[in-house]
Amino acid sequence: MRDSPLFKIVWAHLTGRKRQTLVSILGVMFGITVFIFQAGMITGLQNYFVEKTIQSTPHIQISNETTASEKPVAAKAYPENRDIWFSIRNQKDRLEEDKIKDGLQIASLLENHPEVYGVSPSLTSQAIFKLGVLDVSAIVHGVDILRENRLFNLEKDIVQGSVIRLETVNNGLILGSGLAEKLGANLNDNLNIVSPNGVSLPMKVVGILSTGLRDLDDQRAYSSLRNAQKLMKAQSSHITDISIKLRNIDKAPELADEFENRFGYRAVDWKEKNAAVFSVFKIQNIVTYLVILSILLVSGFGIFNILTMMIYEKMTDIAILKAIGYTDKDIRRIFLSEAMLIGLAGGVLGLITGLVISIIAASIPFRIEGFVSSERLNINFNPLFYTIAFIFGLLTTAIAGLLPARKAAKVDPLHIIRNQ
Amino acid sequence: MPEKTILEARHLDKYFYDPVKFHVLKDINLRVEEGEFVSIVGSSGSGKSTLLYTLSSLDTDYEGEVIIDQTALRSLSNDDLARLRNRSIGFIFQSHYLLADFTAIENILLPGLKLGKRSKPDLLRAALEKMDLLGIRDQADKAVNTLSGGQQQRVAIARALINDPKIIFCDEPTGNLDSGNARIVFDLLKDLAHNYKQTILMVTHDESYQTDRQIRLHDGRVVD
């Protein structure tokens, strides 16, 4: 290859215009670096969120969704008739409890389902947390802590205290880290919880939990199921939610449908629950690809320009090469190779700098507060991005080189030589 | 030794269409035999350069037949013509048309490397031999733009010779040189023809150059 006269010509052209060659290599390199870093950062964050979500939230959650007002009974009597108007003011619903009837039985049925890894029934309610003069509204999540811990590995996320003290300490309470911060609560502090029913319970902070998912950490406190039921003045069979973890997470949507049909309660799988977040992810990914496309488009134009200028400058060289026996194909190959070499060099450099920047960024402590909170950037080093970026780079440079190369191949040596 | 026809033109006609239709070459019939040194002379505008480019495969827009080494050019594709030029034709133009990015010897090697018949060392030896013959051996590794006009033209001649072509076409090979260098280059061509049996067809406006045979062109017609 190195001895081939074509390669020598290519090399002479590229090294003859060092600065321009360098600039176009840098253009390609920049596009690929940015893409690798951006894609790694964004998908890294996305993966972190998904991982945390799968770990810390139910794959399927069964709950009794209390729907808002139904249509008036009178309206039901004349469903299609639009000539009749109803006016019912200040309609009040029958009290509908959000409890799941026979919830504990449903839970034990689910426990025996072959696809289910574990089940944790819970009672969830809004409540006011009072500490000193502070009032904070949050959610009390009454659980059987051993079952909950088996499902969500709470022990791993505990930053202070311990999970088991929820069992051993009467009136124990585990706060989410964000909630604890809002309340200014520390381990072993005493505080009061007031339910919507007006029941007030003194509680003791036995643990502080940080899952990394902001929604949970800022809003949720765990108590024993018993205490939550006390707070709601409910019986010991009263539960409002059943959290389910599956053996195979991909089956969540179909199993959610199955459970919904079987038990008559709303079953939401994790993808559906986070649909809004996933649609944001989708847009982020589109933007990432648009960024690399636009940067590579610009460097593609640069390469196109340089080659076009090169062809005008080397017109007589092309003519004489053809006169001494080089074919159109040889000439086309020269200029295409120049474009591809720029793409190759820019691509390799871009991969390296992208990787290096990603490694550096991943190692810098960096506090993120978004959907998730983390102590550093979670960067995705998926080789797929590196492959895509490299292929993109080569493809754009090849396309950018194609037109000038074809133009060079069409140079008529007679025309050039006779007109000199 | 029986004479062998290297180049033949049969009923060659050519027209220019721009700006108006113009009959440049009119029914040209000619032959060049192996080892002959032939010049085409004529006044400016007589069509002599046009004839040369038509005969040498660079200009393909003509009527009639051109045959080089028993091959009718009309039957060849563009790529085949390029391969024919590479293998069997050498060119020397008024300008040297050397590639400025390369040294003298690299320029000479270009057609040889394209042909790819000889190994690199063989090719290098051949190139140095040709340079020796043309008296420019000591210039081999110099960049071509550091050479004098006469030396550059001699490098161009060496490039034309490297694949031992059947025929060399020259278009005013001495046109850009001073009279001293012009004489040297012409004598070299003559030497190649007489001592190395190199077939040469040369276009010149200078009728004082003594070649084996002169073809005189007037208004697109061979006279004499």
Image: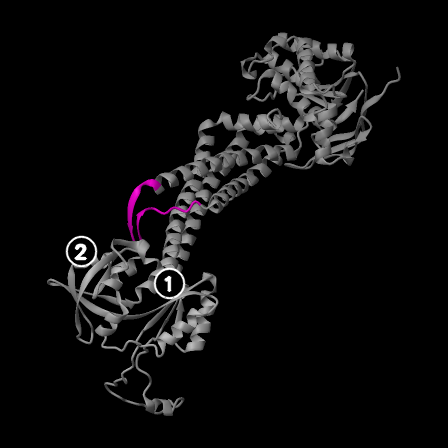
Circle 2: element type: loop
Amino acid type for the residue under numbered disc 1: Asn
Range of the magenta residues? Answer: A363-381
- Give the class, few, some or many, for how many residues have Cα within 10 Å of label 1's Cα (few <14, many ≥20): few
Residue at 26% x, 64% y: name it.
A167
The colouring scheme, among rainbow, by chain, secondary structure or one colour, is: one colour
Q: Is residue A367 magenta?
A: yes
Left or right relative to B103: residue A169 = left
Location of residue B215 (image quadrant): top right
Residue at 65% x, 35% y: name it.
A329
Subunit of label 2: A
* Residue bearing the label numbered 1: A274
Q: Nearer the viewer, residue B18 or A283?
A: A283
Amino acid type for the residue under numbered disc 2: Asn
The quadrant the N terminus of chain A occupies is top right
Q: Earlier in the sequence, mark 1 or mark 2?
A: 2
Marks 1 and 2 sit apart, C-alpha to C-alpha, by 31 Å
Which numbered disc covers residue A186? Answer: 2
Circle 1: element type: loop
Residue at 35% x, 42% y: name it.
A362
Foreground disc of the pair 1, 2: 2
- Give the class, few, some or many, for how many residues have Cα within 10 Å of label 2's Cα (few <14, many ≥20): some
Q: Is residue A337 visible?
A: yes
Up-down: is A159 above or below B209? below
Q: Nearer the viewer, residue B97 or A33?
A: A33
